[in-house]
């Protein structure tokens, strides 16, 4: 119950932190195929190692980009996604803030909230984000920094708050 209250508080906190005025129209996020380089993160500066096709995001703000980023991570790890409603108690909740360059390469990953009882989950989440780089290129924003919440079950499978199916 406490975890659910904490999660609700985090969602409320991040929902209030939006920098987009309530009256501003939000364009639907969609993707198109665009080749971008693969990057390896080192001290906030990506090193280009090869070129692979990636998707571009048409999102105009970080909130809209969250959906494109979440869909990319789900596609990268289809066997790691928790199917259906999550159990009442989560093993771990990790809040990440991911900074991307204009090509979608991960420049930095900040762990905003980490579970002290499950440090291995934090390491795994960071590794998965880095391995999934590049994410859809936020070309309309020239790079972005966005936040998402990882809801991790005891099995190690997870859902992102952006695309969650809810909780029992």
Image (cartoon, grey):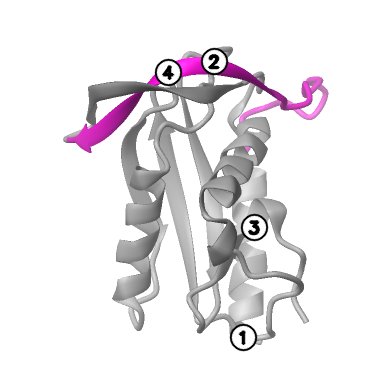
Residue 95 lies within the magenta run: no
- Mark found first going from the N terminus, 3 or 1: 1
| Label 4 element class | strand
| Label 3 element class | helix
Rendering quarter of residue 82: bottom right
User: What residue is pinned by disc 3?
Assistant: 161
Q: Residue at x 62, y 32 (%)?
A: 65
User: What residue is pinned by disc 2?
Assistant: 34
CB atoms at circles 3 and 2 under 8 Å apart? no
Q: Residue at x 76, y 74 (%)?
A: 85
90 versus 40 height, above or below: below
- Mark found first going from the N terminus, 1 or 2: 2
CB atoms at circles 2 and 4 under 8 Å apart? yes
The N terminus sits in image quarter: bottom right
Nearest-to-viewer mark from 3 and 4: 4
> How far across and how far down the image is residue 132, in percent?
42, 43
- Mark found first going from the N terminus, 3 or 4: 4
Relative to the observer, which residue lies in front, 72 or 116? 72
113 versus 109 height, above or below: below
Q: Is residue 144 left or right of residue 11?
A: left
User: What residue is pinned by disc 1?
Assistant: 89
Q: Is residue 34 left or right of residue 63?
A: left
Nearest-to-viewer mark from 4 and 1: 4
Rendering quarter of residue 113: bottom left
> How far across and how far down the image is residue 30, in percent?
72, 25
Marks 2 and 4 sit apart, C-alpha to C-alpha, by: 6 Å
Marks 1 and 2 sit apart, C-alpha to C-alpha, by: 40 Å
Mark seen at residue 36: 4
Which residues are drawn in magenta? 18-42
Marks 3 and 4 sit apart, C-alpha to C-alpha, by: 27 Å
The C terminus sits in image quarter: bottom right
């Amino acid at each position: 119950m406490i975890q659910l209250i904490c999660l609700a508080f985090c969602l409320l906190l991040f929902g209030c932190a939006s920098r987009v005025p309530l009256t501003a129209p939000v364009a639907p996020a969609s993707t198109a195929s665009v080749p971008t380089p693969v990057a390896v993160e080192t001290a906030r500066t990506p090193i280009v190692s090869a070129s692979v096709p990636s998707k571009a995001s048409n999102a105009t703000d970080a909130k809209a980009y969250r959906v494109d980023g979440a869909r990319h991570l789900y596609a990268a790890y289809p066997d790691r996604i928790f199917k259906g409603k999550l159990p009442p108690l989560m093993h771990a909740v990790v809040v990440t803030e991911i900074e991307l360059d204009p090509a979608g390469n991960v420049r930095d990953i900040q762990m905003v909230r980490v579970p002290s009882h499950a440090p291995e989950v934090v390491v795994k989440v960071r590794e998965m984000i880095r391995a999934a780089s590049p994410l859809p290129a936020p070309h309309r924003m020239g790079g972005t920094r966005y936040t998402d919440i990882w809801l991790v079950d005891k099995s190690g499978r997870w859902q992102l708050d952006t695309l969650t199916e809810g909780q029992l």
